[in-house]
Amino acid sequence: MTVPRGTDPATRPMWQRAALWIGGFVALLYGIEGVDSVTSADLDSAGVEPRTADGLSGVLFAPLLHDGWGHLSANTLPLLILGFLVLLSGIGRGLAATAIIWVVGGVGTWLFAGSGYVHIGASVLVFGWLAYLIVRGWFTRHTGQIVIGVVVLFVYGSMLWGVLPGDPRVSWQGHLFGAIGGIVAAWVLSADVRRARSAPVPPGALPR
């Protein structure tokens, strides 16, 4: 990426910064899948293997790994759209939400998913971002975020059936705990707004 001399990248419009971040992340996923497809490294084995010591490290790597190009391409559009919307309200806040989803989704899968399988895929982030976008407006009472949540629910709400058991080849546990992570992230990151809303109004001040 090149920036004109004397230009601070932080001064770019937020939508451009959000697009660059999520575009770069998806490009990274394609690069990793490319390496996995042309080498014998067997990167997919580094995913979450429930309740094994070695499999716990998969919490860090599982969202970066996919079971072939079809798996990755199925996740690509939701990743781009939902990730962009999450980052649009602030890069730092969006990355913090992603980190919470990443950890909660991975640890929940490691603790509760069926043994004998390795769980991989960025769908844990897709479901986490989906849940985060749907509920954050409820916690913040921010009109714009409520509208985004309603639109996201209307467009992608049917995906939430994916948190229920179904196809044994699909990690519904990752979907479920990713969504739980999204709700946790929305709650944690709205704490400042909720505190301000519940603070007593000083005498003579107009309530907001």
Image (cartoon, grey):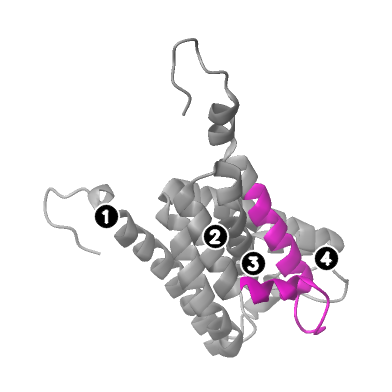
Please tell me the numbered disc located at residue 50: 4
Q: Report if residue 62 is visible in the image.
A: yes
Q: Measured from the top left, where is residue 142 in percent x and y?
A: 49, 46
Please tell me the numbered disc located at residue 13: 1
Q: CA distance from mark 1 to mark 3?
A: 27 Å
Amino acid type of the residue that numbered disc 3 sits on in the rendered structure: Phe
Instruction: Name the N-terminal-most of marks 4 and 3.
Output: 4
Q: Which residues are magenta?
A: 157-185
Q: Which residue is mark 3?
A: 127
Instruction: Name the N-terminal-most of marks 1 and 4.
Output: 1
Instruction: Name the N-terminal-most of marks 1 and 3.
Output: 1
Instruction: Name the N-terminal-most of marks 1 and 2.
Output: 1
Amino acid type of the residue that numbered disc 2 sits on in the rendered structure: Gly
Q: CA distance from mark 1 to mark 4?
A: 42 Å
Q: CA distance from mark 1 to mark 2?
A: 22 Å
Relative to 76, 160 lies left or right: right
Q: CA distance from mark 4 to mark 3?
A: 20 Å
